[in-house]
Structure formats: C-alpha cells, structure tokens
Image (spheres, grey):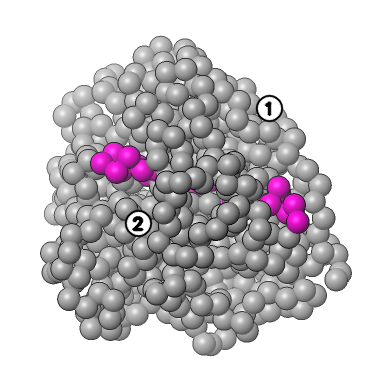
Amino acid sequence: MKKLGSPLSFFVALSLPVLIPQASFSQTSSPQIKTAVVGTAANPENAGADASKPQGPAFATPGGNEWPMPGANTALTRYSSLSDINAQNVGKLTSVLTFSMGVDRGQEAAPLVIGDTLYVVSPYPNILYALDLSKPGAPLKWSYKPHPLAASQGVACCDVVNRGPAYANGRVFFNTLDGNTIAVDATSGKEIWRTQLGDITHGETITMAPLVAKDKVLVGDSGGEMGVRGWIAALDQATGKVDWKAYSTGPDSEVLIGSDFKPFYPQYKGKDLGVSTWPADMWRHGGGTVWGWVAYDPDLNLVYYGTSNPGPWNSSMRPGDNMWTAGIFARDLNTGQARWFYQTSPHDMSDYDGVNETILVDANWNGKPRKLLVHPDRNGYVYVLDRGTGEVLSAKPFAPITSSTGVDLKTGRIQYNAAKQPKVDQVVKDVCPAPPGGKDWQPSSFSNSTGLLYIPHNNLCMDIEEGEVGYIAGTPYVGANVKMKAGPGDGHRGEFDAWDIKTGTKVWSINEKFPVWSGALSTAGDVVFYGTMDGWFKAVDAKTGKLLWQHKTSSGIIGQPTTWRGPDGKQYVSVLSGVGGWAGAIVAGGLDKRDGTAALGFVNAMKDLPEATTKGGTLNVFALP
C-alpha cells in the first residue's frame, strides 16, 4: 500500500450507468427549469398514498414576525407564514440594508430576528452582532467577541465557518470554532455562561448551530477528517452544565444505548456494536461527528440528528459496518438514551456523512397517518422514515448515483455497486456522488403552502484512490486521493429542486453553474429563496420554479436566508453573502487552482470560481418599496 502524498484529492469525466432521480423531464419556456411529470405508479411503496399533501407538525410554528432559530422551528421546516412578499410582487424587492461582518471567510450563518433586534454571528473569530432594527440604518446595539483560540483555524477541515446562533428565553446561544458553547444576554450582550466542549489538540472544532429544545441546548462536534470521536451533548440552558453526552462509537454505555433502544432493523440489535463492527480500537478515533442539523419532536420528546463519516476515509482499513457512523439517531431529550438508529451508509466508503437536515412532517402514507422524518442524504437518496420507529418508508434518488443501485426497503440496507467501491493503490473513476454528496449541509425548506420540499444540492462526481494513513492526534486522518468533477449534464455543478415527498419525484429543477451551497427559504407567499456561489440571491415561484427576481451581491452566497417583520410592520428578507465553506475554499482560502487535491479535492471542481466571485462578508436585507 503506497502512502499518499496529500491528505486527499479528486477528478474530471463521467461514464454510465448512472442512477438518476425518477422523473420524465420536459423543457419549459425557461431553459434553466426542468418540470417533471409526477406520478405514483412507478413507486410501488407509495401506491395508494393519500392525495393530501404533507404538513408541518402542529408544534412546528412557522417563522412569522420573528425568526428565532436557523430552521425557524425544531422541525427544521424553514418556512414562513408571511405573505406580504409574494409571487406577484417579489420582483419589486430592493436592497434596504447592508452590514459588514468584518470577516471575509465563508458566511454560512442564518440571521435571527427577535423583537426589534437582528442577531448574526460571523465565521472565526465568531463575533456575535446585535443590530437595532428600530433605528434608521439598523445601527449596532452591541457585539460580543469570544476570542476563540487562533490555533483552532489550523484544525478546521473545511473553512472556519459558523452556521449561526439560536435564541430562547432572553438568551442567544452559539458555538465557537475552538469548541465552546456560549450563552449571551440578548439585551445587553453580556456573557452568561461559557462551556468548553471540544479539544482542538485532538482536532475537535464546533461549527454547527445549536438547537434549543425545552430546557436544553444541543451541540455536537466537528473533525471527522482529523480522527476525532463524534458526540452530541445536551447542556442545561440556564447554567451550561452538561446534562448528558452520547458518543457515536464505542461501548453501549458511552453511546447511551440501553433497554429503551428499539431499532426497527435487526442489524442494529446486539451488544456493543459500536466496538464489534470496527477493527480493534479503531472506534476510538472513528469519526461519527455531529456537525450538522438537530431536530426535536416535543410530542414524542425525541431528538433527531445525523452522524458523520467513519474515519479514516480509507475504507479498506476498517472492515465492518462501523457503527454508529453515517446514520440517524433518535434519542430521548431528557436522558439522551437512544430510541432508534438507522444507518444510511454502513461501512461508508465515500465520505457520505449522515448529518444533513432531518425535516419533520406529518402525512397520510398508504392511507394511514404517519409522523415522518425526511432526510436528503449525501449518498444521493431522499429518505422518508417513520420518526417514531426508524422504519424506512421510501428512499429515492435526487442526484446522479453510481456508488449504489438502490435501497432495500425490507432490510433498510443500501445496495452498493461493487464496481465503484474504492480500492487501495488503484484509481476508481466516476463515483457519484462525490464526498460532498448529492447535497451537503446546505438545508432544505418544506412549504406548508405547497407541501413540497425545496432542496439545494450538488451535481458532483469523483475519481478516488485509497492509500496508507496513520493516526496522529490533531492531524488529517484521511487515506484517500480524490479529484472531484461536474456530474452528468452540461457541466453544471449545482441544482435547486422542488421535491414531492410522497411520490419521491422532482416537480421542477433548476440547474446552476456551481454547487448550490446556500440554504433554502419558503414562504406562504409561494416564493422560495436561495443563493448561488457566484453571488446571485434568487426568488423563484414555489409551484413552477420560474425565476421571479434576482439580486447580485458582493460575494458568493452560502448562507441561510430568513424572513421576518420589522418594527415598521414591513416584511424583510435577509441573507449573508461571503463565499467560502468547503465548496468555496479556493476563493476564501486563496488556494492554487493548479492543485486539484486542495480542499480535500474540491478545488479540482471549482477552478473557475475565482473568476466568478471574490471574498466577502456582508449581511444583505431586502424589502418591497
């Protein structure tokens, strides 16, 4: 086995066969938009599904006058009940406010609004700003500077991003790159408590947005490419004390698996699978980090979240299913005890983290009311699960796939394509999706108005070669050379889709030149917002995908749009611009496009991004005249 010269790399060309989303496409008047002919006949598991559309659960209060957390609510619907801005008038939107974030790295956070104050947090050094919306120009009320350790920048895998704060009970909660969770008084900006959770000497960082559920603040770690051991922790909202902590690998006692664990599938039953499905002791630095989105159902009192890739990327070194990585946990909020688990990518071979959003909706499924969890995974499938039991009801491709041929609904197991499995010292070409997946962290939005899911995602494939790697704490632990490239089609690397959850098909789809790395926002005005990496902030018709409005910002957009009502009674829409993140590291990090292995191989697919945008860091706010 040869030792690879760089931690990772990726590649450029495509060959069939490719598993593509099931839909027959016809061109509309817009050359960008493909409209799918949708039907249930091709989806046997959906046969007889009730015609009524899914809805957000009763507890999932849509965003309205305020926007208190990135997902709008704990069901993560990212839907607003406001309709002052709608499909008929959104074309008149105009820029009314900009604010410099003071940092020109990737801006992935969601602006929050509570009362007359807007809260937003920057990438490292994670400055929290409070802007006064009651005054002209929204002047700064206060800023809180946590002064994270500078060394944390050196162990951050994929830019020094932060995905935003959360608000509850007069406090703003957020994380810092060096592994702290902080509570700040929302009125004064004074620190209330600060809890150290991560250890950067082991490669741990924190980039995720915390979720506040009842009296707890839920936080997880990053660092799957550094050989860390993943975990999620619940902190007491009032004091910052750790109430419970659950690991993603190791013995049941540390994963918090006990008598309440009732998984739907038999492969998850057995003692200490977080040890026995690994070679000796590899679970101790086996990844499974929790850097994505956390959801919560107060009726079931269950927390839902995904775990990341196992470490290292070199799958030949770790035979076995590598529990409990690359999957979805349901846990009791009070105790942290696991209720069920489902592994989207057992023995993950392509960095298909399971950390993407788990959106909670209710619907009639095969004639029966079901509480559902919808999860567009990096492996390219949109999963629909029963969120009470963990049973997979549907798994349909939304992006080109060659790494697998489908998901067996009887066993729950993905069916890998042996021809596309990575090999040691041999380049395997045209593996789709690439490591950022059919989609990465960029969150989808579910509309109560249309009953559709709006998915920002990637069209990327890769060539991969596995090689030797050893574990050294706080250093890259990858063991693969990868080169990413555009997926099938005309060279486009991103798409924005409207998805029918019940039929498992696209309703319409928009191709974008670069990966769509921003979040999505849907509203009762039947408008959907998203941003592009070359800096366009767009509004499209929620029903047809027709472009209704766009505004060119000063840098690429990878942030999460939000909408809210200002003190003047008007509806506003806000988004951060500032390219970066893993996809935009070539610009934010000033990387050399001649090195296709840079940024874990993403640079190879993004060589033209520096000609399309520049660094930035700006809060943008829009309103009708």
Looking at the rendered structure, the secondary structure element under dot 1 is loop
Horizontally, is 398 left or right of 606 in the view? left
For the point 38% across and 70% down, which residue is it?
A: 395
Image quarter of residue 497:
bottom left
Q: Is residue 618 above or below residue 492?
A: above
Which kind of residue does numbered mark 2 sit on? Thr
Query: Mark 2 highlights which residue?
Result: 389
- Specify whether residue 619 is in view: no
Q: Where are the magenta residues, as a range?
A: 280-303
Residue nearest the viewer, comparing 62 with 353: 353
In the image, residue 98 lies at what x, y percent? Answer: 39, 34
**Disc number for residue 149:** 1
In the rendered structure, does residue 296 fall within the stretch colored magenta? yes
Looking at the rendered structure, the secondary structure element under dot 2 is loop
Q: Is residue 13 above or below residue 158?
A: below
In the image, residue 227 lies at what x, y percent? Answer: 71, 49
In the rendered structure, does residue 87 fall within the stretch colored magenta? no
Q: Is residue 106 above or below residue 277?
A: above
Query: In the rendered view of the protein, which quadrant contains the C terminus?
Result: top left
- Specify whether residue 239 is in view: yes
CA separation in Å, label 1 and label 2: 42 Å
For the point 52% across and 87% down, which residue is it?
A: 17
For the point 64% across and 48% down, which residue is it?
A: 250
